Image (cartoon, coloured by chain):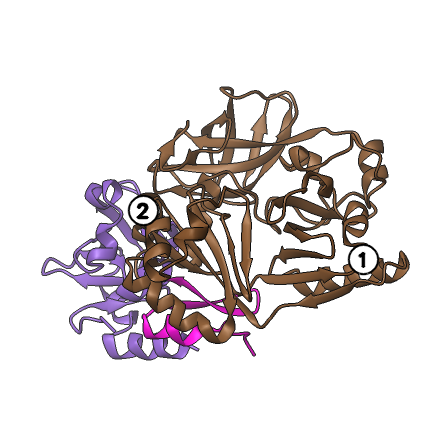
Amino acid sequence: MLKLTPLNATHRELGAKMVDFGGWDMPVNYGSQIEEHHTVRSGCGLFDVSHMLPLDIRGANVRAFLRRLVANNVDKLQVSGKALYSCMLNEAGGVIDDLIIYFMDESWFRLVVNAGTAEKDLAWMEKQNADWGMGLTLTPRRDLAMIAIQGPDATRVLNEALPGVDQITASLKPFNAAAMGEMFIARTGYTGEDGFEVMVLAKSAPFFWKALMEAGGKPIGLGARDTLRLEAGMNLYGQDMDETTSPLESGLAWTVDLKTERDFVGSKALEASEVTKQLAGLLLLDKGVLRGHQKVHTKNGDGEITSGTFSPTMQQSIALARIPLGIAPGEEVEVEIRDKKLKAKVVKYPFVRNGKVLI
Amino acid sequence: MNIPADLKYTPSHEWVRVEADGTLTVGITHHAQDLLGDMVFIENPATGRTLAKGEECAVVESVKAASDVYAPVAGEVIAANGDVESSPESVNKDAYSAWMFKLKPTNAGDVAELLDAAAYQKLVESEAH
């Protein structure tokens, strides 16, 4: 039995092509994935991301708990509403999940975790909560829906759909959130564009979605969500990193704080580890499409593509690949596609931000 | 469902038009392009290549996935459509005018083994869930 978001009937009414996405019945597109992609780069797109799980952690020691639980340092969060991206690691330093942590007050932090890992994450966190004697309350918020409003026109669309909200959107900085009752507005996203991720009570979601569409927001499926995030150089859990890979070999060293004395889960393993690989951007010079798991040949040894696609913005194939250290941007490598070896160039990513190609 | 009655089909979602001179024009069906989504790359077989029935001979790639195209019958490639290679999206616009390659069948009688529109329709319906 597939799981349904509160917007399932809405997607079907809109004629979406629905797919089984890790056990969730989700829209992959509403017609053309490429058109949807361009809409987010030039206008405003709406995404149902209610399959992801908001998780409230409450109690006296939430900050102390998160200091040990995640690889990034929650002490960077000092202003209410501020968000932090982090990995949650296992003892071996592998990535259990990547998540966003919102600091609301000292007794309330909200996390947003991936759909496919939600149950595993919750069990892991409850175990640490018990083992460390923290006495915190972890509340999965399946009563909330989450809608991402993304693109250069996102602020206007949200302001028009929700009169009065401009009091918040006018001053909300990137990677910050504001809560009003059960409504939660975060200036975050997974597209490389300006925009918001808004949580509302599940029963309000279809009405809110409709209001956003009336204001000019266009529905966008998970297909375009993937090409947008890859152009933006954002990792996808399960493809670019997982429990067997180190964040230090997944382009996520910037999210791992080993400088402060914290002793978080996985820190000892990371400190003892030898980093031999890097996550690099690839640009295909020959014709074709880069895909996950294709082999990459470099002068320092072989690597593998973790995520690859055709970039609708660049009209060229791009990828993230885990390759040996010592291969610098500008160097050429070879990618095995079917029976051929095609030329690709190593590049610094992100590929696209705020509608502009950076390569 | 868009399945023209005057064409022949394969279980691997190619369409085949038998021309007056006995040559075959081959493309992928409307259903196949619908499953794959927006096309971004197409690679046709080289003219002059001899194909066995069912041989992988072309590739269509959408944003989402890559898919092989198979020879519907044994034969020799006598033409490949460069236009679909430079404009892969033409397959999404009209799968039945965006032909990929033409074959001269080794045995003219082999086309009898292909599916007719009704049989292909049944196949597509049985694959749907």
In the picture, measured across the screen, residue A130 lies left or right of residue A277, that is: right
| Position in image of residue A127 (x %, y %) | 83, 62
| CB atoms of marks 2 and 1 within 8 Å | no
Residue drawn at the location 78% of the way across and 60% of the way down: A59
Question: Per the image, is B33 magenta?
Answer: no
Residue drawn at the location 74% of the way across and 57% of the way down: A107
Viewer-closest of A36 and A344: A36
The disc label shown at residue A60, or none:
1
In the picture, measured across the screen, residue B93 lies left or right of residue B33, that is: left
Viewer-closest of A53 and A334: A53
The disc label shown at residue A38, or none:
2
Q: Residues within 10 Å of mark 1 (few under 14, many from 20)?
A: some
- Furthest residue in direction left, as rendered: B20
Residue A331 seen by the camera: yes
Viewer-closest of B63 and B106: B63
| Position in image of residue A327 (x %, y %) | 59, 22
* Disc 2 to disc 1, C-alpha distance: 46 Å
Q: Magenta residues?
A: A1-30
Tag 1 secondary structure: loop
Discs 2 and 1 carry the same chain letter:
yes
- The chain letter corresponding to brown is A
As displayed, is residue A255 above or below residue B93?
above
| Position in image of residue B47 (x %, y %) | 25, 41
Name the image quarter holding the C terminus of chain A.
top left
Amino acid of disc 1: Ala
As displayed, is residue B93 above or below residue A75?
below
Amino acid of disc 2: His
Mark 2, chain letter? A
Nearest-to-viewer mark from 2 and 1: 1
| Shade of chain B as shown in the rendered figure | purple
Residue B13 seen by the camera: no
Mark 1, chain letter? A
